[in-house]
Amino acid sequence: MRILSTLFLALLFTLSFVGCKKKDDEISTRDALIQGRWKLTALTVEPGINTGLSVITNLYAQEAFVPSYEKDDVTIFASAGTYQVEEGALKQNPTDPAINATGMWSLSSDSKALRIQETGELAQNFTLISVSKGQFKGTTPFVVQGSSITYTITATWNN
């Protein structure tokens, strides 16, 4: 009986220690964004876009939507609410500048929405689905002018 009591206490101690341990993965959305160098790795659309020949759901695989020379670009979010996009090794033109876009970013008060506005462009608003140190994913609605269809674009960035 004494052995069972000792094992029970040891187990209880171990469980309480593990239960109090902070998860290494816990990080705020803001901190995750500013600590990363983010590459767009997926871009999908629902419902699919009917071209008359096929229905496209994977925009990332379409050169017209995400050109190959943009797939290695890196987005960096700064703590001051600014961001920049650095050109990767692949460039449309060899003389393209190292920084190909800059702008402002912000999170909603509940950190569930990300607003990105490139300098001189309209803002893009993403509802964040998931955020971690290694990946964030968000959706944004898109309506083609003259259409009644609302498309949902889902973008995934990896660090």
Image: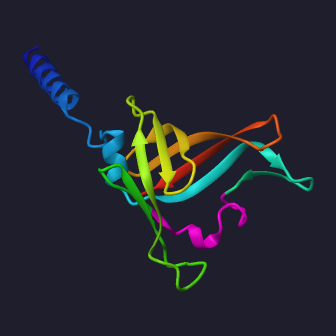
Residue 106 appears at what percent x and percent y? 40, 42
In which quadrant is the C terminus drawn?
Answer: bottom left
Judge by depth and name the residue closer to the eye, 11 or 104.
104
In which quadrant is the N terminus drawn?
Answer: top left
| Residue at 26% from the left image edge and 38% from the top image edge | 23
Residue 30 appears at what percent x and percent y? 34, 43
**In the image, is residue 96 above or below residue 129?**
below
**In the image, is residue 2 above or below residue 139?**
above
Residue furthest front as drawn: 120
Q: Which residues are magenta?
A: 60-74
Residue 68 among those drawn in magenta: yes
Residue 95 appears at what percent x and percent y? 52, 85
Q: How many marks?
A: 0
Judge by depth and name the residue closer to the eye, 42 or 142.
142
Residue 62 appears at what percent x and percent y? 72, 62
| Residue at 11% from the left image edge and 16% from the top image edge | 5
Residue furthest bottom as drawn: 94
Q: Main secondary structure of the magenta part?
A: loop
Quarter holding residue 90: bottom right
Residue 62 among those drawn in magenta: yes
Quarter holding residue 27: top left
26 relative position to 11: left or right: right
Quarter holding residue 108: top left
Colour setting: rainbow
| Residue at 38% from the left image edge and 30% from the top image edge | 109
Residue furthest top as drawn: 1
Judge by depth and name the residue closer to the eye, 134 or 120.
120
23 relative position to 90: left or right: left
69 relative position to 6: left or right: right
**In the image, is residue 101 above or below residue 115?**
below
